[in-house]
Amino acid sequence: MQADLERLDFGPVKRALAERAQTALGEERALTLAPLSQEAAEARHARIEEAFFYPLKLGGVSDLRPLLQRARRGEALSGPELLAAAGTLVRAMELKEGLFSTELEALKALAAGIGDHRGFVRAVEKALDEEGEVRDEASEKLKKLRGRIRPLKRRIQERVYQLMERHADDLSDRFVTLRRGRYVLPVRAERVHRVPGVVLDRSSSGATFFVEPLSVVSLNNELARLLLEEEAEVKRILGELTARLAADREVDATLEALAELDLTEAARRLAEDWKLTRPRFGPPGRYALRSAFHPLISDPVKNDLALDERRKLLLVSGPNMGGKTALLKTLGLAQAMAQSGLFVAAEAAELPFVRAILTDIGDEQDILADLSTFASHLRRLKTILEEAGPDALVLVDELGTGTDPEEGAALGQAVLEALLEKDARGIVTTHLAPLKAFAAEAEGVENASMAFDLERFAPTYRLLLGVPGRSYAFAIAERLGFPKGPLERARALLGEGARTAEALLARLEEEKRALEEALRKAEAERRRAEKARAELEARLKDIESERRRVLEEARAEADRLLLEAERQIKRAKERAKTEPGKKDALRQILEMRRAVRPEPKRNPYPTLRPGMQVEVPDYRAKGKVLELRGEVALVQMGPLKVEVPVARLKPRDEGAPRPTEAVVVKSGFEPELNLRGLTQAEALLALDEFLTEAYALKETPVRILHGKGTGALRNAVRQALKRDKRVERFHDAMPYEGGHGVTVVHLRV
């Protein structure tokens, strides 16, 4: 498949990917990019998508493979090389730790391949300093050796400086130097006999001899011995660190993960720069790309591409330089990039996962092999026909060219028929009219063309489906100033049938263009309507939000007024209790309650009939209409029969909640109190309020509705009545008026 990919410009895509890599590992992986299995490609797609949320930074990562190879061959690495290896492994572990703190599952799965190299890193940090030099603390022996070397060097230098003072006239310069690792004096050649010692070297001019004084020979010997031991110990330490790196088998997996992470970040940057989209692998034989484009073309025109069971092959025709080959490569590149784990050049892409991409694009004539252009086409077509199938993408450029047009057309039709028999999918370009006619009749093939703007004398690169393309040979020749006589003769030789076909194609193309323009306008209108609808919905939301805000403010104000009214009622009741002779306070209470609890509106369900189940809001009870008496209805509520104004009734709602507070009839004082559904504490408070008003208004007798139930509420009410000095006596109501469920109270008036 590699040769087919190169014909699709896959090489420049890989190089663009490599340019965005941060490490040599990633660059190498990008340049060797190739199609993967479907599972591996989808996993890479997922990692690239996650990288948009967590861009990967691989600064400080180097390619350790050459160092590993040397280490595993037994070569000792230098301190700086070991330090670089440790730095790369530290950065790798930091990347792993950072990714494991996220919810990015695809990247975490890849980072899991990074090993634990803390042992090697700690050993390097302990043994080497920031420059890669071995520290004194790397071993006890090295520490002792350097503890002896440093004072010995100072002793030698002091001895040499003393000799320099003594032989100042004999020296060519006043500095201490080293030759062959030994401290020496620079002595003038003519006076070398005046300085006792061993000549170790001379200057390039011969004017200076480097003499090791006899008094420091033994010290230099001792220093040389210690330095040799130090060197051996340093080599041993570096060798141990190298062996530790070579033995760490997790390093290979770490480098593999780092390479893939770098490739992932490079692919993310490529997708961002080129505006690529994550593809989706769909069912076999179905290609659906929206606004696809060639990623290597500057300012490309975008086209929709689709192949399926109905449109298996797309036969594209049109003038040269009109974009037919670019269209082929657009689909082929999208397939190759998707199966290599990259995003594709389209706004949306659904592609099948194919076994092969079969191409015949370009001229590959081989002079050495004596193959002409036509022969090279035939060789590739032979391979395509052998390997074509529903799980392969076929891309053929200029089918039938390179030989006699009639024979080429016949051969081209045979190739198309063979591809259809194999249920292949693909795009084929051609200039041959017989193939356009075949596509117009054959099932599974559809004509298409690349539009050309004659007014601008330039291709538009827009794909027109359903319309075969025109070559525009005469129009182009005329535009280029071709002689009129030969041009008219060519038109005459073309024949009436060909001229008619050309005119028909022109008319079809014009109609197609008009339909597309109408569709474009309709789409623009639809978008405007959608925008207007969205604006209206936004305004409605704002209005609803404002309405809710106003309602909330109104509720808050009503609650404030209600609380204030309740406080005033409470104060008035206190005054009524302390000054029972004053009825004005109680009348004030009643007036306040009417203000706080206004008269109910007229019943919205005024049509009642005997037998209907109703709710009686004044009693917070449910009942059954027994009889209608004009504006009053006789209602059965449990054992009670009560006359209630029709306006105060409404049809029964089984989901209505039970009453949670006592209800006193609001229109004036009603001599009846309903305590059913209240706790004993709530009931006794309501009873006290009720008796206070009744006693002040000299209303007697009054009725207390407490129900039968367990008798607990009835007993609590009667115990309270026994203790109340305002009560003269009380008894059960008559059986037809509630019996044990109602207590009739006579007050002292």
Image: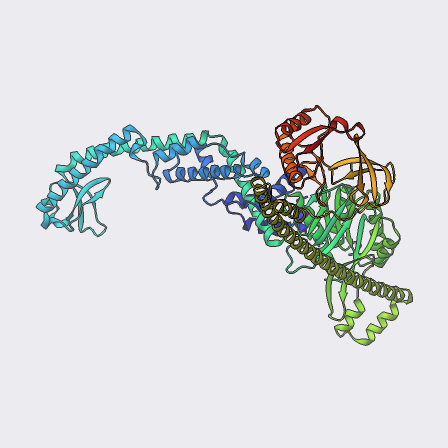
Percent position of residue 96, x then y: 50, 37
| Residue 379 seen in this snapshot | no
Residues 484 and 260: in front is 260
Q: Is residue 662 above or below residue 457?
A: above
In the image, taking residue 232 as reference, residue 245 lies left or right, namely right
Residue 719 lies, in percent from the top left, at 64, 26
Q: Residue furthest bottom?
A: 484
Give how far across and how far down residue 78 sits, in percent.
Answer: 37, 38
Quadrant placement of the N terminus: top right
Left or right of 592, for residue 149 = left
User: Which color scheme is applied?
Assistant: rainbow
Observer-nearest of 690 and 271: 690
Residue 279 in sight in this render = yes
**Residue 223 placed where, x, y %?**
21, 34
Q: Residue at x 24, y 40 (%)?
A: 180
**As drawn, is 229 to the left or to the right of 403?**
left
Name above or below for residue 595 compared with residue 494.
above
The quarter holding residue 677 reads top right
Residue depicted at x 17% and y 35%: 219
Residue at the far front in the pictured view = 749
> For residue 483, which quarter of the picture?
bottom right
- Outermost residue to the top: 710
